[in-house]
Amino acid sequence: MTATQSPRNHRPLGSLSVSPLSLGGNVFGWTADEADSFAVLDAYVAGGGNFIDTADAYSAWVPGNKGGESETVLGNWLASRGNRSDVVIATKVGAHPDLKGLSAATIKSAVDGSLTRLRTDYIDLYYTHYDDESLEVGEFLTALDDLVRAGKVREIAASNISAKRLEESLAFSAREGLARYVALQPHYNLVSRDTYEGELADVAARHGLAAVPYFALASGFLTGKYRPGTTVDSARSGGALKYVDTDRGQRVLQALDTVAAAHEAEPATVALAWLAAQPTVAAPIASARTVEQLPALLAVADLTLTEAELALLNEASA
């Protein structure tokens, strides 16, 4: 099965076909060493996944790391498994400590670094990690189009961009006949809806962009393991704990528990299924540090929520 063939539950993303769960690579080379990362990647692919998300900046925030660690682990896995054509690899440009911003020169240098670390000659989906508002959109879109024409990148996408700049970017590509964004990676989950819903989601819908939400599980909060009075040993616990004592957080957990019990599913699966059911969403991103964390994530492919369950979750998260 190649990345352009479409199994029953895969979704279109430009010319690509992606599985319902995108595996987040932020943990590779951070909380998961290479051996653990390989085990997670093997189990993800064995479970039907084909869409892996990383960035050249992962994981520069870790003391002693410089960025590119995740891509390096992923590249080593691709080389050792010989399965490059079976998976869709997404990475990002613009946030590496040594290559910040989206100037044409930065993009040209950054893509070659990513290709080297990934041990491949093409990237399936290449995101602008953050918009660079110091530049006209034409500078980076022309540079990205050059990469597509050179065969280094198959499709381009945007993350962390305003609705206005996204609209401007799409208009420029259309006017100049350049490669256009086919996907958008927004911050979006049950406890952070206004970071996508509204104007940004409307632009995506109007232009047929596929959304690939990050923080899909709110740094682990939506797994249900963070409750008042509990302690969780996780490098990301700070991000999750901010929701624990909020009214919305408690309403969402209660609704997740109700729906999860009805399906004999994990709260994480329900949270991902809610996202997957939203307009424009192709595949939420979630990461797994261990193989044991994967089944609840992969199960999103087989869970369809009823209208009543979606309404319950919508009301709880409003």
Image (cartoon, grey):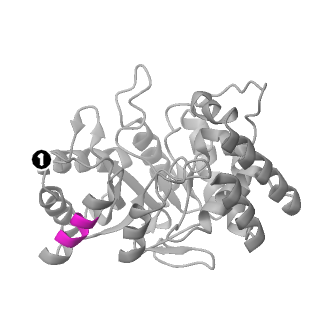
Residue 19 is drawn in which quadrant?
Answer: bottom right
Q: Nearer the viewer, residue 3 or 210?
A: 210
| Residue type beneath disc 1 | Ala
Q: Residue at x 48, y 58 (%)?
A: 82
Q: Determine if residue 15 is in view.
A: no
> Residue 17 appears at what percent x and percent y?
49, 73
Q: Position of residue 114 (x, y in %)?
A: 31, 47
Residue at 39% x, 65% y: name it. 183
Please indicate, yes or no, whether residue 125 appears anywhere in the rendered image.
yes
Judge by depth and name the residue closer to the eye, 204 or 87: 204
Quarter of the figure that contains the C terminus: bottom right
Residue plotted at (23% across, 49% down)? 112
Classify 232 as above or below 301.
above
**Position above or below: 265 against 180:** above
Residue 19 lies left or right of residue 85; in this view the side is: right
- Residue 256 locus on image (x, y percent): 76, 52
Please say if 113 is above or below 141.
above
Residue 95 inside the magenta-drawn segment: no
Q: Nearer the viewer, residue 22 or 87?
A: 22
Q: Position of residue 292 (x, y in %)?
A: 74, 44
Give the position of the N terminus as an image quadrant.
Answer: bottom right
Q: In the rendered image, which residue does mark 1 sit on?
A: 105
**Would you call the spot at circle 1 few (<14 residues within 10 Å), some (14-19), or many (20 or more)?**
few
Q: Nearer the viewer, residue 310 or 266?
A: 310
Q: Secondary structure at mark 1?
A: helix
Residue 168 on the magenta segment? yes
In the rendered structure, the answer to whether residue 103 lies left or right of residue 269 reads left
Residue 205, placed above or below residue 220: below
Start-end of magenta stretch: 167-172
